[in-house]
Amino acid sequence: MSTLRDEVEALKKKIADESHEKDKVHARSWTGRTQYNLTALHKFVFQVVLALSWIYAHVIRPVARILFKPVTWLWRLYRFLWDKAVYYEDAYQNRQFSKTRAGMFLLLSAVFAWYVFVPLVVFICHALLYFSTVKRDEIVYLTNSQEIIPHENEHSVQGCHALPCTDQNSIYFRIRASNFNEAWSILSGRGLFYPDYVAASVPVAISHCKITSYGLRIKLLMRGLDIYPDLLKTECTPLSEQP
């Protein structure tokens, strides 16, 4: 019995060794490597799809619901005004479509959107950005105030948070006229917002400044999308005049 058991064990070991060798040869072959790579690719794609589905279900969809609510409300309001404006009743009290009214309504809609709706949306976005990122009475070192877009009265100011200025602590500001900046200046008791005068308060020499600003201070956005923080108020003293 012991001899038979030894033969069975030896046969099992031989079969296992042969199977291992076959698997090793298959893994080293082109077919084996291709199967392994395809399996890894399928696994990666499946995991990416699961991650994207989670992002859609827990991030994009809830945010889209919140954003689409005002859009849906505005669309319904526009449709209601359209029905009221472009139809008229004939002598038999039947509602008839008027091409003239429709054309005038579209023209007024375009004028309203360009001069009222779009500026209002931009104003709200600036207000939200201001209340979430504003920095009041911040101490920075500023210099090199210059007008970069004359026809829009937009100025650029360079500076840094601490001396010496390096590529790690440097920062750019923009001084520009906007509806929100005008409203902020008036509500703050400073009168109308004049970018030229705010820029003029930054001397050519490096100056110790106390400023009020708002906006995103992300270098990638500044370089790629030309998005800079807005400078609203400055109080500067050149370093040469400080005790």
Image (tube, rainbow, N blue to C red):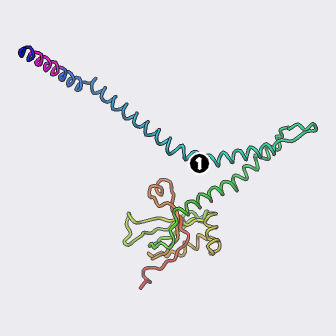
Report if residue 167 lies within the magenta region.
no
Question: From this viewpoint, which residue is outermost toward the left?
Answer: 3
Q: Which residue is mark 1?
A: 66
Above-or-below relation of 14 to 148: above
Q: Is residue 149 left or right of residue 163?
A: right
Magenta span covers which residues? 7-18
- Tell which of 241 and 185 is nearer to you: 185
Percent coordinates x, y for residue 133 in the rendering: 51, 63
Q: Secondary structure at mark 1?
A: helix
Above-or-below relation of 228 to 197: above
Q: Is residue 156 left or right of residue 111?
A: left
Quarter of the C terminus within the rendering: bottom left
- Tell which of 8 and 60 is nearer to you: 8
Magenta: main secondary structure equals helix
Taking the spot 43% from the left edge, 83% from the top edge, the residue there is: 242
Percent coordinates x, y for residue 207 in the rendering: 45, 76
Above-or-below relation of 70 to 31: below
Percent coordinates x, y for residue 192 in the rendering: 65, 71
- Tell which of 226 and 52 is nearer to you: 52
